[in-house]
Amino acid sequence: MDRFVSFDDRAGTVTCEAGLLLSDLIDVVLPRGWFPPVTPGTRFVTIGGMIASDVHGKNHHGSGSFCDHVLSLDLMIGDRVLTCSATENGDFFAATCGGMGLTGVILRATFRLLAVETAAMRQRTLRLQTLEQAIDAIEASLESTYSVAWVDCLASGGNLGRSVLFLAEHAQVNDLSREHQAQPFARRRGRRRRVPIDFPTFALSELPVRLFNKAYYAAQRPGDALVDIDTYFYPLDSILEWNRIYGRRGFVQFQCGLPLAESRSGLRRLLEQIAQGRDASFLTVLKRMGAQSFGLLSFPFEGYSLALDFRATPENLLLIDRLDAITAEHGGRIYLAKDARTNAASLAAGYPRLDEFRAVRQRYGLDRRFTSLQSRRLEI
């Protein structure tokens, strides 16, 4: 289920089976001048998974989520296959986009691509001392196509929310050196490295992470630069089995979205709570989100998204429970694609169209055909 069905390299549309990896899609379409209109932070996801999670990227504030660019999909609901789009079986379409696989099996999809001239990005780097400065800089940069900030989540006091903001545009041929203009789609990917062992517990304790965060912040020089497309979008993909950094227990992820009006106060409370925990993530990502996506369970809506990884320890699970509570108090929601431990009440508080989603499943008997560990835990 990982084959191309058709590719119109003039119109920039592709039809493929749902098991096609994003990395394989890019390898085929990028040399022909096209790129996914929305991409998550890794290439190692399937197109069907991107639809089921309605993934967003660093350009949601201007381009929406991936499903905003899906023209149609074929969905197997058990005894038949339906073609779904905004105008055909629209209730299935809205439930499937972001529906975490609970409406059926996505077989294939047709979606639009983005025209690009090169495999390079024009990146602008800004260092911000506080959360307020970071949000102000992001709001002042909404015309940038791509925007993402790394946050030092152990910084506290006057440095709470210390960040590095990365803005970017797809580079044009004229932006390249003469040497590279002859091969504008050449990708200068370095050798992949593999984490060889499970790191010991102390490797991600407070002091090593604090030192790493300070060093990383200092190393990000403000200014403009040309970077490879993989460097900007998929920095962790060059490190195979990077999850082993978190040790044998592994890690859990937390990602929340906060409404625009509540973002400053909510993010401050979240970061204060995380800094107090003293077992924070070295990979904390802040993004500006745009308009509410159409999917009944789609995560993105206008405001800010904060994503972190935590070592899977009892203390950190309790910490994330507190982060859930703060998120709910500020009218936010948890991203289902990153969730492994939240509860049904948190889900219901954050997703006002949950009952519509349940109604679609019940109307067509899908609640008796498709379930998951997550759906049972969250009473979807």
Image: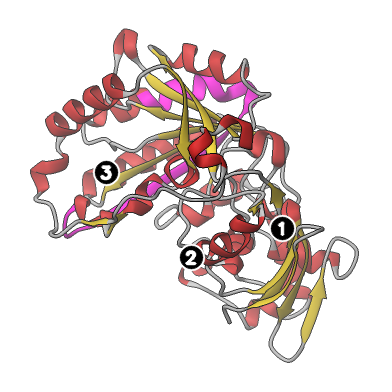
Q: In the image, what residue occupies the spot 48% across and 38% down?
A: 179
Residue bearing the label numbered 2: 374
For disc 3, the marked residue is 316
| Residue picked out by circle 1 | 355
State left or right for residue 183 relative to residue 365.
left
Residue 192 or residue 157, whichever sits in front: 192
Q: Is residue 325 above or below residue 297?
A: above
Q: Please provide the residue range marked out in magenta.
A: 247-271
Q: Is residue 175 rendered to the left or right of residue 143?
A: left
Measured Cα–Cα span from mark 1 to mark 3: 31 Å
Q: Which picture quadrant has residue 244?
A: bottom left
User: Which comes before the other along the chain, label 2 or label 1?
Assistant: 1
In this image, 188 relative to 358: left or right?
left
Q: Residue at x 52, y 60 (%)?
A: 378
Q: Which mark is residue 120?
A: none
Residue 365 at least partly seen: yes
In this view, which residue lies farthest toward the bottom? Answer: 79
Quarter of the image where one finds residue 277: top left
Q: What is the CA distance from the residue labelled 2 to the residue labelled 1?
A: 17 Å
Of residue 65 and residue 183, the one placed in the foreground of this image is 183
